Image: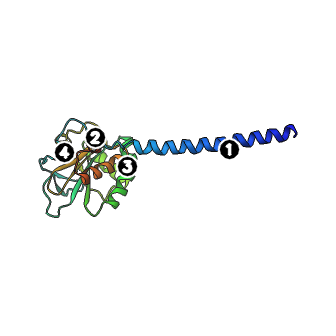
Amino acid sequence: MTALAISNIVLWLVVVCLVFVVLALTRQLGVLHERIAPAGALMMNRGPAVGQRVEPIDVEDLTGRPLRIGAPRADGRSTLILFVSPSCPVCKALLPVMKSSREQERGWLDMVLASDGEPAEHRQFVGDQGLHEFPYVVSAALGLNYQVNRLPYAALLDGEGLLRARGLVNSREHLESLFEAKRLGVASLQEYFASRA
């Protein structure tokens, strides 16, 4: 055998070994993914407790339409209040996720965007981001009622006016974790996984 043939055999053995290493690493990543539970939306220690009835607040959206947020609803639909700001880059990145979630959950959920500040700035934000189909409320009292101190923040109310889930929502997974927490009847996915451990 020549040196060239021996080096080809050695190279093929190395390639076969690398294939097995890649397969083993792929399997380990799958195992790791199964063991790590999704974090879900981060709940803050401030504000109304999940399961508590919230105080209804009468507000108007940017078009002047009156809304009563937190009151029991005759149609039984839930309401997601998403607190955002025109100056928040994470909020802007979350808007497409919110729009697709609205479509996916339209059978049981209504969404309201909320903020505080100058209405003119928020009208510009609604126009720039194409948010005309959402009720948009500018109300400092609403943010104070839910003790919102970081954005984007969401609160999910059921049709009876009970707070079902809440927390910081920085991604699609965080937003959907609120829906899943409501379906499971827990305050958060963290609570659910802790109870199963």
Report if the CB atoms under discs 4 and 2 are less than 8 Å apart. Answer: no
Q: Residue at x 14, y 46 (%)?
A: 52
Marked residue nearer the N-terminal end (1 or 4): 1
Helix, strand or loop at disc 2?
helix
Helix, strand or loop at disc 4?
loop
Helix, strand or loop at disc 3?
helix
Spatial CA span between label 3 and label 1: 39 Å
Marked residue nearer the N-terminal end (3 or 1): 1
Q: Measured from the top left, where is residue 83 in percent x and y? A: 27, 45
Q: Which of the two discs, 2 and 3, sits closer to the camera?
A: 2
The residue to which callout 4 is attached is 50
Who is closer to the viewer here, 86 or 83? 83
User: Which mark is drawn over residue 141?
Assistant: none
| Total count of labels | 4
Q: Quadrant of residue 40?
A: top left
The residue to which callout 1 is attached is 16
User: Which mark is drawn over residue 194?
Assistant: 2
